[in-house]
Image: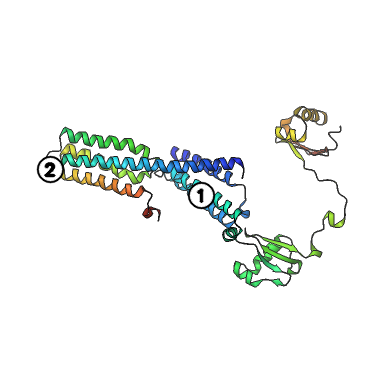
Amino acid sequence: MLTIILRSIIIYLIVLFVFRIMGKRQLGQMQPFELVLTLIIADLATIPMAEISVPVLHGIVPLFTLVILHFLLTLLTRLSTTLSAVVSGKPVILINPRGIDYKAMKKLSISIDDIFEAMRGLGYFSLEQVEYAIMETNGKISILPKAELAPATNQSVGAQVEKAVIPINIISEGKILKENLALANIDEAFVEKFLKTNIGKAKIKDVLVMTLDDNGAVYLQLKQGQKQIFENVRAA
Amino acid sequence: MKIFSKIMLVLIFVFLIAISIIEEVVASGSLQEAMADCLYLEEISEGREDLRTQAIALAVDDLEYHWKNNESSMCFLVNHKNIQEIGLEISKLKVYQKENDLKEFRACLDAVKFYSQSYLHFMGANLHNVL
């Protein structure tokens, strides 16, 4: 049993490493060859994990070989659009201003229901609302609505808006994020002083979350308590 | 591609080449050594009615000693099930040599030769194995 436990740990770490260097794509974003690769990796990893007579190297070597192949294929598909089209396919227009392209539907083996499902998922319930629908190479359907039904943006309505700012996470579950302190241009002493001034006895370990944005707005919530928002903290 | 991924890819590539070379050297070397020991044993036992001589006993011990040494390093590279028969036949060989059972001794010797030869073929990178 100890052998199986140790083998499982080794294989787990190797699979983790393999996925780490292969990138962070999620299942739905994968190209067909990436999905196949993921399934093969999962299968390969289980063999030496449970079968003691099989050396761990019999699992590691094919895994590493697939990683090399994956990178080679990715590199080649980047260099050649033809190869990219062969390996990953091309986006296909399913709905155009003339209506649904039945030939494309047949070619992709999808039904009207699949198109409706994708449309509903994006908030469009009628075919009349859609100008174009495109089946992407990863199998997702993208929708371009008719111009009059497209969501309004600040730009399209001419609204004056403030510059968008990203709040920087300063404390997360009682731990101060030192890398983010530098990004926010503050130090630990500032955080402690702020907590002392505004919360009293609460310490950093009592904070669930604290964020600070470029406008000086602080969002603070203690583990035992409700959210509090402070404006112009830097100015103060 | 990040520099980390590039370095890792190069390391993986080097690892794969190294492991292929090591496998070729260790597995082939071990099996060829077992084969050579068997041939020597066959040579010195041929035509003899009595197997209980010092030369044959030493040759059997050598075969067992070499195999045990090589088996542990082969376990990193080869499925254990594929090579365990050789160890089993060598153990039997030792018993039959002590009991002077000529028929079984020769059968075991042939079995060790057969397994060594088969695995030598089985482990090599040739077209039959690849396809």
Q: Secondary structure at mark 2?
A: loop
* Horizontal and vertical percent position of residue A154: 84, 54
Tell me if A42 is positioned left or right of A178 in this view.
left
Three-letter residue code for mark 2: Gly
Amino acid type assigned to the residue bearing label 1 in the image? Leu
Are dots 1 and 2 in contact, CB under 8 Å? no
Classify mark 1: residues with Cα within 10 Å, few (<14), some (14-19) or many (20+). some
Q: Identify the chain of the residue marked 1, using the numbered disc in the image.
A: A
State left or right for residue A234 relative to residue A72: right
The residue tagged 2 is: B47
Q: Quarter holding the C terminus of chain A?
A: top right
Q: Most extreme residue toward the left, as rendered?
A: B49
Q: Which residue sits at x=63%, y=54%?
A: A29
Q: Position of residue B5 (x, y in %)?
A: 58, 42
**Which residue is rendered at x = 49% and y = 51% of the image?**
A43
Location of mark 1 (residue): A66
**Viewport quadrant of the N terminus of chain A:** top left
